[in-house]
Image (cartoon, grey):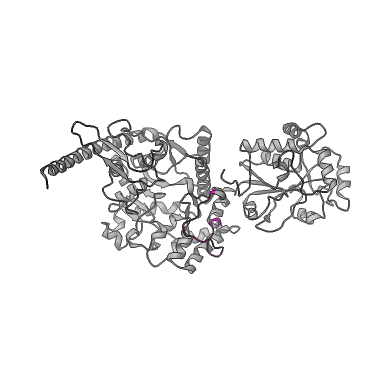
């Protein structure tokens, strides 16, 4: 070896030592400052040493706002299964990252929500500029570039692949590590609330997992430096569920859900996590060719410290069924899918709750010989670029996955998410051609289902089977599609008639004609809508004198005035979504066409509905635009 090469090697080692010293100094200072910062933000907002739930919201990009929707659905599912839930929820988000309307939605999702502003990275404009500018999507590994000139005293770090991302996206994954500096909390329960869904009660088990350190470790855990799990109360997480049988990655966990005990909260832990984030000592344990943000940081830090596994069912990848088919075989895959189908049945979630209540932390983890914890998922995690709200036109299928109605469909797990989202929503269903499969499944998931005029029930997939309210007028056909028979099942209070100010006698006479409804207002066999719907509503829509609103518009107005949850969904009102010059009615007879021109002004109704849609009051239930 040449003498110059030896000198260069010694210089490089000395330079590396200088870098490590600078990194440690910065991260220690940062950890102490973060702990003080967290204590100041949480002062007076939580009880001393109270356990907290924590999350961070990725509100960026074209579909960033949908993560707020995902957060709302997650909290709805938590409260659905835990009516007495009362822990503080810490939402980590940089100031200015969310618009005011999104902040209001986040705070409104749960009354003990606390917005936490992470401490800014202190070395962004200092010698360590850009140390953790990282794009999760690019999966790029951090590389250090050291200055070779002795006169260059500035330490620089850079990334070798992909263009720089805005700080509010790339750094958020690391900034949420500041939850480890929340020493005012007894424990931290971390969740990716933006794309997860709770299927069963679980909160009562979390303290037990921390007290017991999770489940009994397997051989690979002990080889990694573990001790008896009951002796530690530090960090607990479920291993990635579809890798439970691969020995080399048996304990690798997804950062979407983990529990942090008090022994792992403090500035020292945060400083060490930041050390790893800046200068990973070895390659990722998941993949040597990529670094998955804070997930790899946490795995590397807790791999041989205080990490213990909890059941895989606590963080089940949405794609588990397709993976289960490959790893476990067709029959086991069917068990998972059957469990999901049971939950989708009316009352299915409630019927399964008592079964899960018997399962505690004594349940063996699925390492090699069981799939039981996976066939009873507790929390579904919608990993990957395709979310339940992603429009079908831009969905990305799994590589090599063949769609099979028998074994797996994206809609199986997605429908669970929509079931929770639509659980307290209202939908107005018209008779237009847009009412088609598989929208019927989504219609039946809604709490209130408003159908108009002489509607048709075809099948579960096409139109749905449920009806909670019917909106009719005096000329609604009774014998068409068995309308009168269907109305009889609802009861008078749920049959709402638009009278348009006409006398009761005239309305009853029209309904008694051979093709009429056969009902009578005078006998209180249906309910007359208030005057608002033919006076004030006409002015709101801007209808010309002598015209009145379409039945669909009346149903939408009633839903907005009588229900609290938004948006109100609409489907089948195709007449009012068409262009002003191109609309046609489903019944193309001359009588109906003349009636439309005489009593209605469809363009006015159409413009009013479009305005409601722009304000977020209503939304079209259309698979082609869901998620936009």
Query: Residue 186, position in %: x, y?
Result: 36, 44
Verify whether residue 456 appears in magenta: no
Query: Residue 376, position in %: x, y?
Result: 48, 60
Furthest-front residue in this view: 2
Closer-to-camera residue (313/540): 540
Quadrant including the C terminus: top right
Query: Residue 112, position in %: x, y?
Result: 47, 39
Residue 78 shown left or right of residue 182 in the figure: right
| Residue 358 can be seen in this image | no
- Most common secondary structure along the magenta stretch: loop
Verify whether residue 401 appears in magenta: yes
Residue 298 shown left or right of residue 445 in the figure: left
Residue 218 shown left or right of residue 431 in the figure: left
Q: Is residue 114 above or below residue 486?
A: above
Closer-to-camera residue (237/125): 125
Question: Which stretch appears magenta?
Answer: 394-411
Query: Residue 511, position in %: x, y?
Result: 85, 48
| Residue 549 can be seen in this image | yes
Location of residue 567 (image quadrant): top right
Closer-to-camera residue (438/117): 438
- Residue shown at 65% from the left, 57% from the top: 461
How many numbered marks appear? 0
Residue 245 shown left or right of residue 330 in the figure: left
Location of residue 184 (image quadrant): top left
């Amino acid at each position: 070896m040449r003498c110059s090469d030896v000198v260069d090697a010694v210089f490089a080692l000395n330079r590396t030592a200088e870098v490590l010293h600078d990194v440690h100094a910065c991260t220690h200072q940062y950890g102490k400052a973060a702990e003080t910062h967290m204590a100041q933000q949480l002062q007076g907002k939580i009880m001393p040493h109270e356990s907290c739930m924590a999350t961070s919201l990725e509100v960026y990009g074209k579909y960033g706002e949908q993560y707020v929707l995902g957060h709302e659905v997650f909290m709805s599912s938590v409260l659905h299964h835990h009516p007495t839930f009362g822990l503080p929820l810490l939402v980590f988000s940089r100031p200015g990252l969310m618009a005011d309307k999104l902040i209001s939605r986040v705070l409104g999702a749960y009354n003990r929500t606390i917005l936490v502003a992470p401490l800014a990275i202190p070395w962004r404009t200092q010698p360590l500029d850009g140390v953790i500018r990282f794009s999760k999507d690019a999966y790029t590994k951090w590389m250090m570039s050291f200055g070779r000139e002795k006169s260059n005293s500035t330490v620089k770090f850079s990334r070798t692949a992909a263009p720089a991302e805005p700080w509010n996206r790339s750094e958020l994954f690391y900034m949420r590590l500041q939850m480890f500096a929340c020493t005012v909390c007894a424990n931290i329960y971390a969740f990716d609330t933006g794309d997860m869904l709770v299927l069963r009660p679980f909160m009562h088990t979390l303290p037990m997992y921390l007290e017991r350190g999770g489940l009994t470790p397997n051989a690979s855990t002990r080889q990694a430096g573990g001790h008896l799990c009951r002796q530690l109360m530090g960090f607990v997480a479920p291993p990635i569920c579809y890798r439970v049988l691969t020995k080399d990655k048996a304990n690798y966990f997804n950062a979407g859900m983990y529990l942090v005990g008090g022994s792992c909260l403090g500035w020292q832990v945060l400083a060490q996590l930041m050390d790893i984030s800046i200068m990973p000592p070895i390659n990722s344990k998941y993949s040597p060719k990529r670094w998955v943000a804070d997930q790899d940081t946490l795995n590397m830090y807790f791999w041989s410290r205080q990490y213990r596994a909890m059941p895989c069912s606590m963080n089940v990848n949405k794609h588990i069924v397709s993976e289960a088919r490959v790893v476990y075989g067709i029959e086991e895959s069917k068990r998972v899918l059957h469990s999901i189908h049971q939950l989708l049945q009316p009352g299915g979630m409630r019927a399964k709750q008592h079964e899960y209540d018997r399962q505690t932390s004594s349940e063996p983890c699925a390492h090699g010989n069981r799939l039981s914890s996976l066939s009873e998922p507790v929390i579904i995690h919608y990993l990957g670029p395709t979310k339940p709200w992603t429009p079908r036109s831009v969905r990305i299928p799994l590589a090599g996955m063949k769609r099979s109605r028998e074994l797996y469909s994206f809609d199986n797990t997605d429908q669970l998410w929509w079931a929770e989202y639509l659980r307290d929503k209202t939908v107005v269903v018209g008779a237009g051609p847009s009412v088609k499969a598989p929208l019927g499944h989504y219609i039946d998931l809604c709490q209130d289902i408003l159908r108009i005029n002489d509607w048709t029930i075809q099948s579960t997939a096409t139109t749905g089977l449920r009806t909670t309210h019917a909106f009719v007028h005096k000329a609604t056909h009774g014998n068409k599609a068995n309308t009168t028979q269907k109305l009889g099942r609802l009861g008078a209070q749920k049959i709402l008639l638009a009278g348009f100010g006409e006398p009761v006698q005239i309305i009853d006479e029209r309904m008694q004609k051979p093709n009429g409804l056969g009902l009578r207002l005078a006998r209180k066999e249906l309910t007359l809508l208030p005057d608002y719907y033919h006076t004030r509503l006409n002015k709101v829509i801007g209808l010309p004198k002598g015209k009145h609103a379409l039945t669909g518009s009346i149903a939408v107005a009633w839903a907005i005035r009588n229900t609290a949850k938004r948006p109100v969904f609409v489907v089948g009102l195709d007449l009012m979504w068409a262009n002003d010059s191109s609309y046609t009615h489903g019944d193309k007879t001359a009588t109906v066409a003349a009636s439309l021109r005489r009593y209605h002004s469809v363009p006015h109704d159409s413009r009013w509905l479009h305005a409601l849609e722009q304000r977020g009051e209503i939304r079209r239930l259309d698979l082609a635009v869901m998620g936009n």
